[in-house]
Image (cartoon, rainbow, N blue to C red):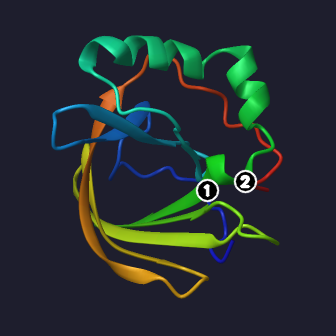
Amino acid sequence: MELNRMDYYSTELRVQGYYYSVENDGTILPTYILYRNGVLLKLNGGPYTEMELSNAEAAWLSERSKELRRDVHMDWGIFLVHQDKIVIETWGPSRGGAPPLYRIEGYIVNDSIFVTTEFNNCLGEAGRDEDTYYFKHLAQKPDSTNTVIE
């Protein structure tokens, strides 16, 4: 990671749930869970219909899910917030060797919405792509314990 993990105690974004985007067909794609320790969990799976979403949320909390993702680089990342800007770093799928680092930047609309505007990775791929992420509250989040982010 190029960013240093920093605890997040600000209020620019809510962290008591997860952020999702909405696909063109109206299905929901859960994407990120942000934690106060500056770690983020990338959610895999989906897109889901509204009815399927509660089953996915329950599955994220299972011990099996926790065990499976604890050591998986692609499931973890770091986020930093500064005023109305957000920067996210995660790893992508390995193409032989170390997994490539992905950096996503965007801006914060309010405490429940952020928009990503730029992405790049260590493979030289970069671009502008605007995606909007909306907050959904969770009574309980998956644990942020992992072996990937210090």
State the quadrant of the C terminus: bottom right
Tell me if mark 2 has few (under 14), some (14-19) or many (20+) residues whose alpha carbon lies within 10 angstroms of its own: many
Q: Quick one: which residue is furthest to the front in this view?
A: 95
Give the residue drawn at x 66%, y 72%: 100
Helix, strand or loop under label 2 = helix
Give the residue drawn at x 69%, y 71%: 1
- Mark 2 or 1: in front is 2
Residue type marked 2: His
Q: Quick one: which residue is furthest to the bottom in this view?
A: 124
Is residue 128 among the parts visible in the rendering? yes
Label pair 2/1, CB-CB below 8 angstroms:
no
Residue 140 tag number: none
Residue 77 tag number: 1
Helix, strand or loop under label 1 = strand
Residue 73 tag number: 2
How many numbered marks, from 0 up?
A: 2
115 and 21: which is toward the camera: 21
Give the residue drawn at x 71%, y 64%: 94
Q: Is residue 7 above or below residue 122?
A: above
25 and 1: which is toward the camera: 25
Q: CA distance from mark 2 to mark 1?
A: 8 Å
Query: Residue 138 placed where, x, y %?
Result: 42, 21
